[in-house]
Structures are given as structure tokens and as C-alpha cells.
Amino acid sequence: MTSEGGNYKQGVIYKYDISTTAYTILYHFTGEADGGLPFGSLMQASNGLLYGMTSSGGNGSNFGVIFSLDPVTNIYTKIYNFNNTNGAKPKGGFIQASNGLLYAMITDGGNSGLGTIISFNTTTAAGTKLIDFNGTNGNTPLGNLVQALNGKLYGLTSTGGTFSVGVLFSYDITTSIYSVRYNFSNVSGGYIPYGSLVQSAAGLFYGTTSIGGTNADGVLFSWNDVSSTYINFKKFQQQFSN
């Protein structure tokens, strides 16, 4: 997806054939009821459909939508409207967890206006708000969730937490327990994470922050959830050339 451009300057969905180098636009967002300005990623669910979200548009709300695209027929379907209470203006994408549900962090909206976590049932087209970010437990998530080897979902928020510069959290899809696992600090070498976590086969989580480190250009960090150990082992450094 692109977040802008297309016939209505609201973004497009496209495909690219790596064999023929053919680029084809499949859908032009209008910014109206169908949604507009998608910032996140598409994901293919077990039913074969692609799912994504837009940061604007919807039925009169302009808080964004959930949609599907059939990669066989190229049929686009708007299937869910954000209404601010359940979240607003998502900037990330979905993952499909082991229970078959889709999960995503929503950047804005919710009870405190600081974002939510939702699940989405592709069979019933029902969205369920699971968590309201409130500042203390984090706020303004910008990336995607990841399902860890232990079955829990893990993610990052860009701000909020004890030091107001982001948290690393877990969410148990079985017990519905949300837990802040780490509070980023502006004195501990990395803060304000914008992206998503990945987990290695050894069980460690890896991610990046946008600020912090020796050069204040962000760090690459690891997180051991068993021992609650955070290590920033790579300091990014901006390079300038004449």
C-alpha cells in the first residue's frame, strides 16, 4: 500500500510481479466510506484474503476502516469502521494469532484517546476492543504486534509508561492479562520506539528505538522476557557526507 497518491490522492493498493517487473494498481482509496491514507502493512490471513487498515475515512467518522482484498478477484471490501471508542487512525497492521483471530494496535482513540489493542474475527467481521492505552500502560503504538513462542502477544508503544518515552508489553490472549514488561527511559540508552519487535529462535526479542544511545540517534536492543533483561547493544549514528 501507499499512504498517498492514486486517483484521489488517498493512497493505493498495488501488486508487483518480480518475474515480469509489472506494477499494477488494484485499488484507489477515495478517503470516503471506503477509507483513505493507509500507513500500515497488509497481511494474508488463513482464508487467503489480505487484510489492512486505513488511518482515515469510514462512514462519516473519518477514524479509519478495516478492509479485505481478495488477491484472486482483486475485490476490495470495507468491512469495519473505527469509531474512536474502539480506536482511531491506525498506523500499523494485523497479525493472525494461533487462535485464528487478527490482532492490531490502534494508534489513537479509546477511552483515553491514546490508542487501543483490538481483535478482529474474519468470520463474523466483529471487532473487539481489548485494551485501552492510558499513558501509564503506554500510549500511541505505531508498529505491529508479534506472537511469541509462549503464545503471548508482544508490542511497543512510542510514548507513555513510567518515563513517558514508551513501553514494551505483553498481552495474554488466553487470560486477557496485559503487562508492561519494560519501561523505556531517556537515561538508559534508548527510548521512543517506533517499530515492531521480532523474536529469535532462542527466545530473545529485538527492536529499535528512534532516540537515545551515545549519539542520540537510537539503538538496537534485545529483551529477555524470562530474566527481564534489557540490553542496548548497537548505537545508531547518523552519517553525513560533503
Image: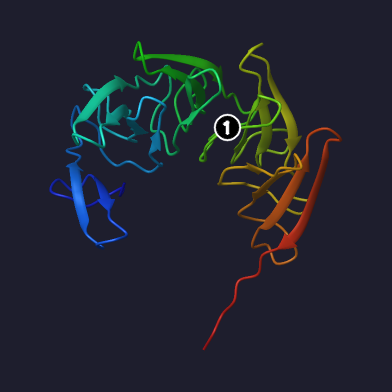
**How many dots with numbers?**
1
Residue wearing tag 1: 139
Vertical side of 17 occupied by 45: above or below: above
Give the farthest residue toward the front: 19
Report the front residue among 99 and 112.
99
Q: Position of residue 14 (x, y in %)?
A: 25, 48
Q: Check disc 1: other Cα within 10 Å, few if <14, some if 14-19, many if 20+.
A: many
Q: Position of residue 15 (x, y in %)?
A: 27, 50
Secondary structure beneath dot 1 equals loop
Vertical side of 89 occupied by 219: above or below: below
Give the farthest residue toward the bottom: 242
Report the front residue among 242 and 122.
122
Determine the residue positioned at 43% across, 19% down.
Answer: 120
Q: Is residue 114 left or right of residue 147?
A: left
Q: Is residue 116 left or right of residue 11?
A: right
Q: Position of residue 33 (x, y in %)?
A: 19, 27
Report the front residue among 40 and 213.
40
The answer to whether any part of residue 188 appears in the image is no
The answer to whether any part of residue 209 appears in the image is yes
Report the front residue among 214 and 69.
69
- What's the residue type where badge 1 is placed? Asn
Determine the residue positioned at 75% across, 48% down.
Answer: 222
Q: Position of residue 89 (x, y in %)?
A: 38, 33
Determine the residue positioned at 42% across, 26% down.
Answer: 46
